[in-house]
Image (tube, rainbow, N blue to C red):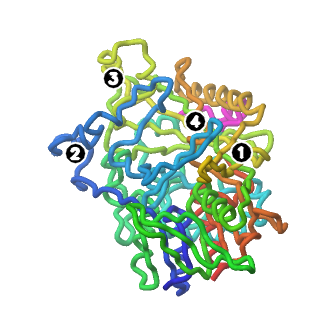
Amino acid sequence: MDKNIVVGSGASGVHFALTALKKGCPVLMLDIGREKPLPLLPEADLGSLKQELDDPVRYLLGPNYESVTLGDSQSDFYSFPPSKRYVFQQPRKMKFRNSGFEPVLSFARGGLGEAWTGGVYPFNDEEFADYPFGYKDIEPFYEEVAERIGIGGESDDLARFIPVHKHMMQPLRLDTHSQELLNAYARHKSTLVRKYKCYLGRSRVAVLSEDRCDRSKCDYTGRCIWGCPGGAFYTPSLTLAECMKFPNFTYVPQMHVSHFKCDGSGRVKSVTAHPIDGGALEEFPVDKLVLAAGPICTAEIFLESIHRDTGEIAELHGLMDNRQILVPFVNLKMIGKAYDPETYQFHLLAMGLEGDNPKDYVHGQITCLTTALVHPIVQKIPLDLRTAIDFFRNTRSGMGILNLNFADTRRQGNMITLEKDCNGQTSLVIEYTALPEENREMRHAFRRAKKALFRLGGIVPPGTFRVRAKGESVHYAGTMPMSKKNGKYTTSEYCQSHDFKNLYIVDGSTFPFLPAKNITFTLMANAVRVAEAAF
């Protein structure tokens, strides 16, 4: 039996595994691993799909229209289509108590990366200041991941915040609206930089702009929201499939890992899991155990293991979350113009708002979503639904949404722990409180972005922006941070636990600071870095 065990098939887990496999090491991966449905009519564009499917409503919206959201105060602006629901399907009811923090979890093959929007942004030296290494130390691993997954982008004004690495392809073709925004930025750049410290450039995205191996380049079918049918858009399940080609890789799906067991010397000796559809517990012997289940599930395994071994209810402090603001806008210059549905649907442009301190950088992504079936502005118009939809059809070419992302820091009290009920059963407790100044800082950034959008031709109607709930970013970190000090519930420079000698943690749990940028690229690069050191 393979004794190098990886728990979880998300972005970190699969890249750790692939690196170990390439070095000749055997790897066994335990995963719940919900499988995605096969794409329907993969050669068809979105328009053809609507015409050729026997029941397009079921595929696009769901049999009971469950993917339709009209933007009420309790819902997000958008919901996931039926083809993405498997990503969030839970095999069991996770029991946890929280203080307004709503974690988003995935038990799919590939994890939450199966429903991401592909943003890949390396951290810079200022953002690595709290880490036990700098950008140059991880740069080779960013480049390795870029070569594996395929990244489109270019060196532009955002390079002042986002390092430029090797193995970048040409960026994707811009849609008409994104091109208009970029042209407006060129005209008003000096004002935008001087007054608002605002920079605009091409988003870095994990999408092929040229054919690579068995993956075809983006063919602009407009189906991104429902899932890329040709593999141009990277998801971690593609790397999992690559791992499965190795004879020294064993994948065991449908297994829920509950805890690990230790010997008397502080080493993990086995990991315990049970089949999700029922059956006896199974114990897997371990030489090296790698937790890559995401900070929430990794914390549950870690805390449950300590509790079963010692009876202690431990606390993991420092939980971080990227808070987000969604800012819908309409570009008046685009109203009345025809829209082209055969375009890439997620963000093609990124916005950087410079802060007084490099760590205060605010990262924005601009998405035009021309094939979305409704838009947040339409949801808020005081018109009947039919009239509002008619309005949308005449203005959709100029509609967009800006997603502003904010950095977070580790704080005592923001924690994950356990509690026991009267029957002795444990459940998770998640505590998260925002900084007192957070609301002021977020509103200040929103006002800057709103004024910048106006310079670019975009109007943000009053009352349409939305601050997303705590936990909705899905970017969590900080509960077992990397540290050069041998502290309790911390990890080494190479993410090796200071509490259990042969335990590695390669998800966001080990990040001591959470920048505003999407962390997925850094998670993958760090996992490769750790695997290179571990084997």
Compare marks 4 and 3 and give the one earlier in the sequence: 4
Q: Which residue is mark 4?
A: 185
Viewer-side residue, 143 vs 300: 300
Compare marks 2 and 3 and give the one earlier in the sequence: 2
Viewer-side residue, 259 vs 506: 259
Q: Position of residue 529 (x, y in %)?
A: 64, 72
Q: In the drawing, does residue 365 fall left or right of residue 115?
A: right
* Circle 2 or circle 1, nearest the eye: 1
Numbered label attached to residue 408: 1
Q: Which amino acid, mark 3?
A: Asn
Q: Within 10 angstroms of label 4, few (less than 14), some, or many (20 or more) residues?
A: many
Is residue 94 covered in magenta?
no
Q: Which residue is mark 2?
A: 49
Q: Position of residue 458 (x, y in %)?
A: 52, 26
* Circle 3 or circle 1, nearest the eye: 1
Q: Which amino acid, mark 4?
A: Tyr
Q: In the drawing, does residue 302 fall left or right of residue 339?
A: right
Question: Are the two marked residues, 2 and 1, in contact with CB atoms closer than 8 angstroms?
Answer: no
* Circle 4 or circle 2, nearest the eye: 2
